[in-house]
Amino acid sequence: MLELLGLGKNSVELYRAVLAHPGISVEDLVDTLKWPAERVRSALDECVRLSLVRPSWEEPGTLKPVPPGVGLQALLARQEADFLERQRQMTDARVEVSRLVHDYAAVQRESSHLETERIEGIDEIRSRIEELSHSCHDSLLAFHPGGGQSAASRAAGRPLSGTLQSRGVVMHTIYLDSIYNDPESVDYARWLLRSGNHVRTTASLPSRMLIFDRQQAIVPIDPDDSAAGAMVFRSAGILANLCELFDQVWDKAVPLSGEKRPRQPVEENELTGQEQTVLRLLGEGLTDEVVARRLGVSVRTGRRITAELMGRLGAKSRFQAGMRAVEYGWLGGDEDRAAPPDGAAEEPAEPLGETSADASELGESSV
């Protein structure tokens, strides 16, 4: 217990030895304690510093103990003073913490009334998503681009979904069709379904987006750079448009399939939603990298899909592929569709490098 007063174990043993043998010399202490001389001198220095042992004035070379009622009481009083000072500091810290909690709550109340709020930094974005989820009581609408979801994202999503479900919140989530390339992500999406939520997939999504109770929405400032920050919208006008966008995409999206992959076209000229999206994006002049990111697939997979479409259209350039896709009605309704000319599919497509399938996915943004 004496160690609580600031005494080391060696110093306690040495002090007890001097108390038992007043007038003992350093050499005799070495023999009594059976310690190396250096260890004895180190413990002795500490006892002298703490005023527990002093050299004898009458017998040079020997040591006298300071009585415990004097030396140890002084140490005890010093420790009590330190303890009281620590208590005072803790009281001051408690007051400061209360002040910070109050100030932060005031800032949060003020920001909750802003129609538009800019958030910067991944940590701040995630913190705000947690806060908005905590205050969500009815519905959570979500766009999840990027293909397969990371293990970290799935791990974080399970407890969040459970918390929302316990409050009666129903989630409507739209993933990309490319989620089927990742069995673990598909298993997670089916777990959401079993938990009472709704999940659909579509060929492409404009951006990651979360809408809480149709009253607050958070979207990335730059869909291609999550580190650029995010925006929180509370304006009724903006929310109405974002909700309408979600509803339109939801109506065209397909419920999560019970199969390993969604149904493929059975007619020769029928296109998958992913293929239609590739043609549309190429028609907009977007690069292979951007097209792949919109689909949530690797660049190599995106190029393979493009090459196969060009081969089916008998196109030698992407521009020609876009023109023929429009001509054949591949980007319109069935009533406008014309049959490709004989032999069109046999014309070689322009070389695009590696075209083998690749199931790797692009990374996810934090929003």
Image (spheres, rainbow, N blue to C red):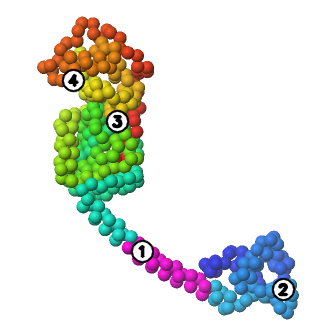
- Dot 3 corresponds to which residue? 147
- Dot 4 corresponds to which residue? 331
Spatial separation of the CA atoms under disc 4 and disc 3: 23 Å
Work out whether mark 2 precedes mark 1 in sequence or the reverse, and give the earlier one.
2
**Label 2 is placed on what type of residue?**
Thr
Work out whether mark 3 precedes mark 2 in sequence or the reverse, and give the earlier one.
2
Spatial separation of the CA atoms under disc 4 and disc 1: 63 Å
Judged from the image, the secondary structure of the residue bearing numbered disc 3 is loop
**Label 3 is placed on what type of residue?**
Gly
Residue displayed at 18% across by 50% down: 237
Spatial separation of the CA atoms under disc 3 and disc 1: 46 Å
Residue that lies at the very extreme toward the left in this rendered image: 335
Disc number placed over residue 96 in the picture, else none: 1
Q: Nearer the viewer, mark 2 or mark 1?
A: 1
Q: Nearer the viewer, mark 3 or mark 1?
A: 1
- Dot 2 corresponds to which residue? 62
Q: Do residues under tags 2 and 1 come within 8 Å of each other at their CB atoms?
A: no
Spatial separation of the CA atoms under disc 4 and disc 2: 104 Å
In this rendered view, identify the residue nearer to me: 270 or 157. Answer: 270
